[in-house]
Amino acid sequence: MPIVYVETTIPSFYCDERTTPAVVFRRELTRIWWPAARSRYDLVTSQAVLAELRRAPEPKRTVMLAMMERIPVLALTEQALRVAKVYVAQRVMPRDPGGDAMHLALASVNGCDYLATWNCRHLANAEKLPHIRAVNGELGLPVPILATPEQLMEEAHGVGPDQG
């Protein structure tokens, strides 16, 4: 099965209770995608994700951590740390090497097929993809497909916004 790195925004939007249309849309798609993803993919995460989730307020924190309980946690290796620093130095990702840069580094170093995220500014951003490909190419690393749950649903189920 394809390997999907689950980034922090996935459990975060799953539990988000805001009522703005964009948040409701992402929450509902995430709630539809999550059960299917658990059976269609080998899901993985990282200590970086769990650390971010632990900073959330209750009761959201408990629910999000419970979602991630049975998902394997990728090891934080020296290689991943080095790659995250390269992403920051090459301006692929913002300065926080423990955040987006670390998620991309862990997914890349571990050969994940996908990185599931709702972060469309730094990760699932088509305009950043050529830069990510160039840097990973120089590092000899594969590039995971950076996708939202909506994109993964379309690929996995043929369900898109116009199809149902």
Image: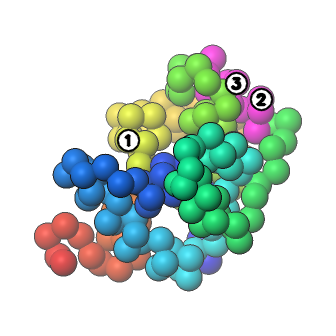
Of all residues, the one furthest to the right in this rendering is 78
What kind of element bears circle 2? helix
Vertical arrangement, residue 103 with respect to residue 62, above or below:
above
Vertical arrangement, residue 154 with respect to residue 111, above or below:
below
Q: Position of residue 32 (x, y in %)?
A: 37, 74
Q: Mark 3 and 1 residues: CB-CB less than 8 Å, in contact?
A: no
Disc on the earlier residue, 3 or 1: 3
Q: Residue 86: say if magenta.
A: yes
Residue located beneath label 3 in the image: 85
Q: CA distance from mark 3 to mark 1?
A: 21 Å
Q: Residue at x 76, y 38 (%)?
A: 80
Of all residues, the one furthest to the front in this rendering is 58
The amino acid marked with disc number 2 is Arg
Residue located beneath label 1 in the image: 120
**Residue 48 seen in the figure:** yes
Q: Nearer the viewer, mark 3 or mark 1?
A: 1
Q: Residue at x 35, y 79 (%)?
A: 157
Residue located beneath label 2 in the image: 82
**Residue 155 seen in the figure:** no
Q: Mark 3 and 2 residues: CB-CB less than 8 Å, in contact?
A: yes
Disc on the earlier residue, 2 or 1: 2
**Magenta residues, as a range?**
80-90
Q: Locate the C terminus and report the quarter of the image it occupies.
A: bottom left
Q: Locate the N terminus and report the quarter of the image it occupies.
A: bottom right
